[in-house]
Image (cartoon, rainbow, N blue to C red):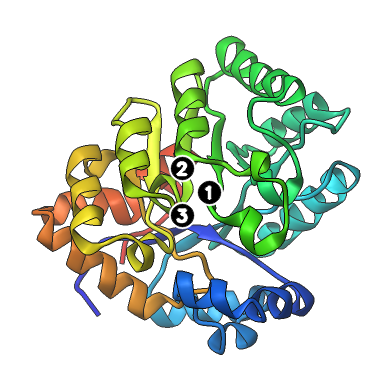
Amino acid sequence: MMSRPMIIDAHVHIFNQGIIENVAQKTEMVRRLHQEANEVRTRTGIKTLEDSMKTAGVEACLLLPTAGPEKIYKTNSSFINAAAGSRHIYTAGTLHPDYLKNRDELSRFKSMGMRAIKLCSFSQGFTLDGEKTIALFNLIRDENRHNDGNLFVILDTFYSADKFFGTPAGHNTTPALLGELVRGYPEIRFIGAHMGGLDAPVKEIYEHLPPRDNLFLDTSNAAHTLERNDFIRLLKSHGHEHIVFGTDWPWFGYTGEIRLIEGLCDEAGYSKGQKASLFGGNIARLLGIENRLISH
């Protein structure tokens, strides 16, 4: 384990056994994404997550819930309660273009100091360029314009979601669609999960997701699907201030992921301070929690 600065995992899921089994049985997808399908069955629940973090020396993590429109309030409440019981766990909130009370949920997030909004278009069942989706992003943009500007959006990306889950191809978050949002909403900071395009052709990531002030990429899973040179190229081009560390826990464990990303950062020429930004500093600033955490 490296002598390291504070580590915050910006991409964590809490799944029930049903979801885990459903995904783990998609053997071709598991193989393609190099997921740890055997180990994942033991990685359930907040207590297991906290124990895993403590063992690996991870200071904090961010939970990423999603839900259909009928379960938005209930899901957010469940994750808020889970995070409230731990000083190491934070949570995003989720919204949906078809949910009728997104404005009320944003007010609830703000009252609790929550800044992160997680969206997963393929699993939640909407198109990124649909009329209701545009209205949702307009709402988030207006909140940022008229208030403190601290809301940011984490967008899951899985280029082949339609192939493996049978969802409409139009619901996939592709590099092109994510890039349109980043350009169209400069008032919103975006995190493109999985370095902007899980299982996407890397040329599309390069073309549609060039470095921008309001674009961040998270490392989760991507080091297992991108060629090593391509991952390093993204580290160099986007820079240490716009990359955040994520594991996609429970699909990947901490020790291996920390070691893997640190090695890639070394190959990209990152200094100790630059690695500190990637591993914890950037997401801490986005969440506004820099002063609440103590470095190891």
Mark 1 belongs to which amino acid?
Thr
Marks 3 and 1: CB-CB under 8 Å? yes
SS for tag 1? loop
Left or right of 66 in this view: 116: left
Crowding at dot 1, Cα within 10 Å, few <14 / some 14-19 / many 20+, comes out as many
**Looking at the image, which residue is at 61% across and 44% down?**
172
Q: Which mark is residue 198?
A: 3
User: 167 or 149, which lies in front?
Assistant: 167
Q: Quadrant of the C terminus?
A: bottom left
Rendered image quadrant of residue 133: top right
Cβ–Cβ under 8 Å for marks 1 and 2: yes
**Within 10 Å of the Cα at label 3, are there few (<14), some (14-19), or many (20+) other Cα atoms?**
many
The kind of residue on which mark 2 rests is: Gly
**Of the image marks 1 and 2, the number of the one nearer the N terminus:** 1
Point 82% across, 27% down: residue: 104
The front one of 54 and 197 is 197
User: Looking at the image, is mark 3 or mark 2 earlier in the sequence?
Assistant: 2
101 sits left or right of 259 in the view? right
- On residue 157, the disc is 1
Element marked by disc 3? loop
> Vertical placement of 131 versus 93: above or below?
above
Between 176 and 157, the one lying in front of the other is: 176
